[in-house]
Amino acid sequence: MAITALPPDADADIARVTEALAMITPRWNVRILLALSGPPLRYSELAAKVSWLQSGQLHPKLKALCDAGLVERIEHTARHVTYGHTERATALLPILPMIVTWAEDHLEKADRPLPAIEQIEDSLTLLTRRHAAAILWVLKSRKEVSGRVLARIVMPSSDWTNIYPPLRQLVADGLADTEGNGQPYRLSAAGDALGPVLGTLSAWSAGQPLDQAARHPVWGQPQAKSAPRPWISSQSRPAPAALPPARAVGSSPAWHHRDLFSHAAGRPTAAIPAGGPRR
């Protein structure tokens, strides 16, 4: 079912990206994925890596990530189960440094050096605001647009004045600009700079190679697009005859999950609260 008044391809694109962000943004999800970036781990081994999670918090998080097709649960024996990345999660990892780069350039500087993982969490919080993806898409494609017109495109079945709370939030977050009441809205420099991140998330959520981001019709250069392929949610399966070997050095990103936790001191902090960005 359409969620905007945009053409079907654009509407489906926004829906996929919104769903992808909803998978990875919940608290601790990215940290769990990074902890699993090496060989598959038993539950106790993973729990030791994310020791800040309280008892009972890890299991539902793992189940949700398995249901999303990001984590694979492998039953070697009835008492030997390991968890590791799916192909989908492995394809996601190169997007994380792109988010860090954007955050370092466009988020407000904190009073202390922040680990890259916190930069990622802060950025994802901004992108998962209600209607944020759809509004950013329209502002990028229309350049300038009034609140009333934007409402007809983004939320065609709602009262048009409902567009203003998410719009004001995007302005407060520094992703959109306006010259005042009654004036049109446009992307800010920070919002426009999200192009590589959103284009790559679009490619990933459609099951396309990440280099297709450069051809995105809104965030890249319009060219012929590859047909999307569906991702299959991960289900428990029997173990292979032998444990799978660790991925070759050349097959993983140049950075390692420990790099994203650099500068961390003690118990990690949560992403910024919904009340405002770190700007």
Image (tube, grey):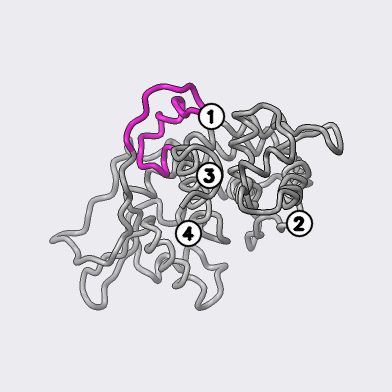
Residue at mark 3:
259
Please name the residue that numbered disc 4 is placed on: 32
**Which range of residues does the magenta coloring cover?**
203-227
> Residue 145 falls in which quadrant of the image?
top right
Viewer-nearest of labels 2 and 3? Answer: 2
Specify which label sits upstream in the sequence, 3 or 1. 1
Q: Is residue 114 magenta?
A: no
- Rounded to the nearest angstrom, the CA distance separating label 3 from label 1 is 28 Å
Q: CA distance from mark 2 to mark 3?
A: 28 Å
Q: CA distance from mark 1 to mark 4?
A: 29 Å
Which sits earlier in the primary sequence, circle 4 or circle 2? 4
Under mark 2, the amino acid is Gly
CB within 8 Å, label 4 to label 3:
no
Amino acid type, mark 4: Ile
Please name whichever residue, 74 or 161, is drawn nearer the observer in this view of the structure: 161
Residue 200 seen anywhere in this rendered image of the structure: yes
Answer with mark 1 or mark 4, whichever residue precedes in sequence: 4
Amino acid carrying mark 3 in the image: Asp
Q: Earlier in the sequence, mark 2 or mark 1?
A: 1
Name the front one of labels 4 and 3. 4
Q: Which mark is residue 275?
A: 2
Q: Are marks 1 and 4 in contact (CB under 8 Å)?
A: no
Q: Which percent across, then down, holds residue 2? A: 49, 49
Q: How many marks?
A: 4
Residue 154 sits in quarter: top right
